[in-house]
Amino acid sequence: MENSLTVVDNRTGKQYNFPIMYGTYPNYGAAIRSADLRQIKASEDDFGLLGYDPAFLNTASCKSKVTFIDGERGILRYRGYSIEDLATKGNYLEVAYLLLHGELPTHDQLADWTKNIMHHVLIHENMKKFMDGFLYDAHPMGILVGTVAALSTLYPEARNISDPMVRRMQFYRLIAKMPTIAAFAYRHSIGMPYSYPDCDLGYTGNFFNMMFKRTELKYQPDPVLEKALDILFILHADHEQNCSASAMRNVGSSLPDPYVSIAAAAAALYGPLHGGANEQVLRMLREIGSKDKIPDYIKRVKSGELKLMGFGHRVYKNYDPRAKILKEMADQVFEVTGKNELLNIALELERIALEDDYFIKRRLYPNVDFYSGIIYQAMNFPVDMFPVLFAIPRTVGWLAQWEEMLNDPEQKIARPRQVYTGYDCRSYVPMEERNSKV
Ligand code: CMC
């Protein structure tokens, strides 16, 4: 039978046929349904075969039309449009519209979308007081995760997730308020009064205003840096079924409001193996300190003592296309900000690593986090804000994944199985009979 898989169970000699399903590309993403494996039983009372896949190395958890990655060839597309085209020709809110709606907006649609988002950038004064409760040295990512979850209490109607209009309102609010919460978290940490949004400025221009405005009457962002941050936001907007998107879908599958699901996704992003890597790259480059220390550092990485942060990816086994765009963009930013010495260390580190057998064999290339941190630092963002700068634009990706999950009739509450390897049934041992040496 064409487009099917025939499996023989050597325990029983029985043969099974499973249909193979395809996505857009026949050579990329062909799959069988894991649930079909349950037909394979060694005996009548056998539960049936499971697929065992720790860390989901080879499991497709959904069908998706949002983002396509070909990790072998270093391709990333949102809704079919290449990341290179979107980064050079689009702007962040336009790309956000594309991710959520599936199509690029018309002029009027974009104007309406932008107006609605900018209308919601303020946060309730109670949220400001809530943020005041954090210690001055609280990590801004912790503040972001806590505050976005707290928004759930302000908008109880958001629990009505089956109503598309209610969902739409939360899209506006979440995309609008994440930069405000992020900037307020930063101002809180340095003891500066909060800088309120200025909607005359665009989405990224206003973010600079909320971060860096001091005593001037009107803050004017540098246009080159504003454009660069907009591109960074586009590059970070979605990345299909990564750890945080999967957290969004998993938590969202029990049908809570989107604020707590976004908090869960942001928590997943916080870790150093995911969105927290940009922060770790900068700390690593500072620790290396100068080019002559690189060979020693690489030795420690190869011995397994350390990981080279900003290198490697579960999906990309080629240069991450986002890192390529950022490497090229760095020079434009440095023309405005002055050169960041860490860039020279990063370039040399990349050169040495890419010539080394250890990295070649494992197909480890720079990922998006390798260059983003150096650019953020040049723009004056403190290091612990880097994962927050990832979370702001990724919010739209999480929402697009969530919306797709809710509208997918095949999705249910996420609930993996396990292969139990613990004790068989045992009798309770009374306290006086327990061996204290064990
Ligand atoms: N430095 C040194 N060795 C590495 C690295 C690294 N950064 N990444 C992977 N390896 C080695 C790993 O030790 C393993 O070697 P061996 O076969 O000898 O055991 C081999 O390469 C395969 O790695 P893996 O751990 O099986 O790969 P994974 O798909 O489970 O992990 C990763 C992917 C991104 C978590 C990992 O490459 C890593 O920890 N990188 C550093 C953190 C980082 O930069 N994260 C940002 C990812 S991109 C932004 C995002 O989307 O979050």
Image: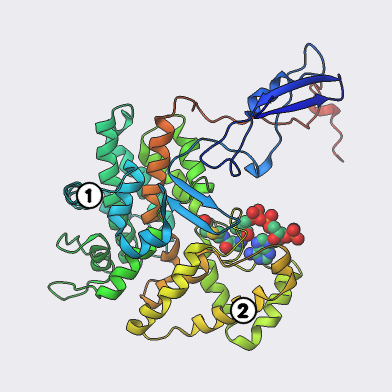
Of mark 1 and mark 2, the one earlier in the sequence is: 1
Tell me where residue 27 sits by quadrant. Answer: top right
Instruction: Name the residue tied to disc 2.
Output: 351
Q: Which mark is residue 117?
A: 1
Of 212 and 308, which appears nearest the observer? 308
Relative side of 263 to 29, left or right: left
Q: In this view of the protein, which residue sits in the foreground, 299 or 18?
A: 18
Q: Is residue 389 visible?
A: no
Choose top left, top right, bottom left or bottom right for residue 72: bottom right
Classify mark 1: helix, strand or loop.
Answer: helix
Q: Residue at x 46, y 31 (%)?
A: 253
**Name of the residue lying farthest toward the front:** 2
> Of all residues shown, which one is farthest toward the top?
44
> Could you tell me if residue 27 is visible in this image?
yes
The kind of residue on which mark 2 rests is: Arg
Local secondary structure at mark 2: helix
